[in-house]
Image (cartoon, helix red, strand yellow):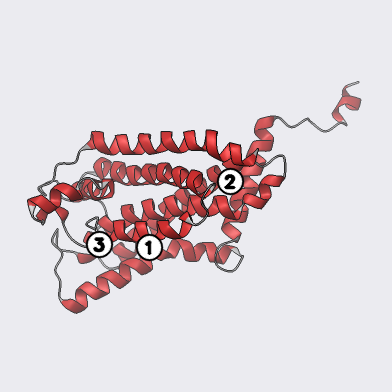
Amino acid sequence: MNAHASSFPRRQSHLDVYLRVLNALMLRDMRSRFGGNYWGYLVQVLWPCAHLAIVVGAMTFRGVKAPMGDSAMLFVASGALPALAFQYISREVMKGFMIHRPLTYFPQVKRFDTVVARILVEIVSSFMGLCLVCVVLLCFGVDPVPVDMTTAICGYLAAIGLGIGVGTINVGICSVFPGWAIGYIVITLTVYLTSGVYFMACYMPQEVYYYMKWNPITQIIEWVRLGYDPTIPVQVDYLYIYGCIFGSLTIGLLMERFIVRAQQA
């Protein structure tokens, strides 16, 4: 009886099917980058290093000194990494939803599955890029370890959380207005250039700094930099940042429930 029963394949649970779907979507995500192979995914991870090299090279050529600490590389990295983490995740989650939309014709694949898969891929990519930048800094004799590790890591995680929240909102908007994908690129570029990646926002005139702090990315960058230099004159509104993260995530999930699913039905 036992031998006869063991000849039948085990019935897969809903969790097994869901995990297999996520695994397939994540592998497809990684292979669909830059040429349709896994080397293209490596290019995605290398972007932060290329970005750091270009900006630091420009600062060195112009003779611009870092306004915080003694290393221009560390200063740029402390601002660019959280800003790029937010930018990539919030944008790529939306792109993944649009790219994988044809797969949702299969009954096992739901539109929200494509969102979750892209979020997981982008989180892994962000941490791989962070580790790679740290290795590059060490190769140039720069210590990437912050004075307050907890503060710096929490700030970076806040950037990832905000990227997920805004990314889910973008999915809801793109399900109705696909052209939003192009418009959002302009928005993220503007936010990136005005968030204080290449300068210290707290040294701007007080009237300008007041309005800059309404941008949560500005405060997240200051949060990360506090981990490297606790003496910089900034006051991070943690409640405001948490409100932006959980508020955007709540709005995005509600849009997925009432807009994205309605489009799928």
The answer to whether residue 142 is seen in the rendering is no
> Residue 82's mark?
none
Nearer the viewer's eye, disc 2 or disc 3? Answer: 2
| Residues packed near mark 3 inside 10 Å, few (<14), some (14 to 19) or many (20 plus) | many
Cα distance in 3D space between marks 1 and 3: 11 Å
- Measuring 59% from the left and 55% from the top, which residue is drawn there? 99
> Residue 114's mark?
2
From the image, which quarter does the N terminus lie in?
Answer: top right
In the depicted structure, whether residue 130 falls above or below residue 34: above
Q: Name the residue nearer the viewer: 35 or 12.
A: 35
Q: Residue under circle 3?
A: 76
Cα distance in 3D space between marks 2 and 3: 33 Å
Q: Amino acid at mark 1?
A: Pro
Is residue 8 left or right of 192 when viewed as pictured?
A: right
In the depicted structure, whether residue 112 falls above or below residue 24: above
Tell me where residue 58 appears, x and y as whole percent: 24, 75
- The answer to whether the residues at label 1 and label 3 have Cβ atoms under 8 Å apart is no
For numbered disc 1, what is the local secondary structure?
A: helix
- Measuring 36% from the left and 57% from the top, which residue is drawn there? 188
Whichever of labels 2 and 3 marks the residue nearer the N terminus, that label is 3
Q: Amino acid at mark 2?
A: Thr
- Measuring 24% from the left and 50% from the top, which residue is drawn there? 218
Whichever of labels 1 and 3 marks the residue nearer the N terminus, that label is 1
Is residue 12 left or right of 180 when viewed as pictured?
A: right
Tell me where residue 104 appears, x and y as whole percent: 67, 45
Quadrant of res 237 = top left
Q: Residue under circle 1?
A: 48
Tell me where residue 52 appears, x and y as whole percent: 31, 66
